[in-house]
Image (cartoon, rainbow, N blue to C red):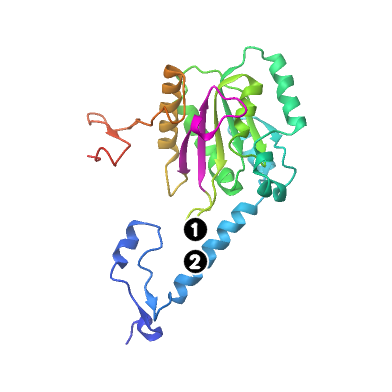
Amino acid sequence: MNDDNSLIGAIENPWQELRRLTPARIALGRAGTSLPTGAQLDFQFAHAQARDAVHLPLDAAALMTQLAGHGQQALVLHSAAPDRHTYLQRPDLGRRLDTASAERLDQHREQHADGYDLAIVIADGLSALAVQRHSQPFLERLREQMADDGWSLAPLCLVQQGRVAVADEVAERLGARMVVILIGERPGLSSPDSLGLYFTYAPKVGLTDAYRNCISNVRLEGLSYGLAAHKLLYLMREACRRQLSGVNLKDEAELPSLEGEQPARLNFLVDSLQ
């Protein structure tokens, strides 16, 4: 009777050992027909974190300072959604730039008529926390890996109250033939700070998600910055070669391997990792 759980009537789940392998809420045990108090409180805390992540405003000034500290400057833009409340109720407004931002990009294009190979956009999305934490270190790894590709880069654009499709308008106005947007994903109960990457070749206003490739769950507990950059570069290089993106462009990138080893494919459902 020295076991605390015995004192409160909680019954341990025999699958408890599996919890070491996943952050998923499995093998939580039970007290009668209910969850133990600790598990219930953990759930409520995770739910509160997810809700807070959706409503937390992006600290654009802090992010700009962080980027500038690593030699990266950005244009600060805004979607047609004037505030967070409107943004959450009107997804369509988050997909377009406001008038002032559109005019600013048009003026920039007049001075750079040749356009660019790649535009990189950052948007708060549904988790400004993810953007605040992960966008700068990811961009650092991406720039390291793409240094030899020789692509011309449009000015980095930071869009407040933006959704995925706003990147298409940014790229079209800048004359970029490819665009990738770094955006906060919808928070989950174990991942309030998950960063998503959406890549589009030949972007223009009105494209559907079928024309985009997604790399999700970029964060310290998920997909690493280096591996996410590796996957994205594969998609960009293949898109340039085949002149398409989206459902017709499959991610068949190979995992970086140690010297002398055979590379392993990323699709563990098809090829088992050696």
Of residues 202 and 263, which is closer to you in this image? 202
What label sits on residue 189 in the rendered view?
Answer: 1
Depth check: 119 or 97 in front?
A: 97
Earlier-in-chain disc, 1 versus 2? 2
Label 2: which secondary element: helix
Given the current orientation, which residue lies at the most extreme right position? Answer: 100
Which numbered disc covers residue 132?
none
Residue 215 in picture, x, y percent from top left: 46, 38
Residue 1: percent from left, percent from top: 32, 87
Would you say residue 69 is visible in this rendering? no
In this rendering, the answer to whether 30 lies above or below 249 is below
Q: Residues within 10 Å of mark 1 (few under 14, many from 20)?
A: some
What residue type is disc 2 on? Phe
Q: Residue sitting at 57 percent across and 29 percent down?
A: 207
Quadrant showing the C terminus: top left
Residue 267 is a magenta residue: no
Q: Magenta residues?
A: 194-217
Q: CA distance from mark 1 to mark 2?
A: 8 Å
199 w.r.t. 153: above or below: below
Q: Are marks 1 and 2 in contact (CB under 8 Å)?
A: yes
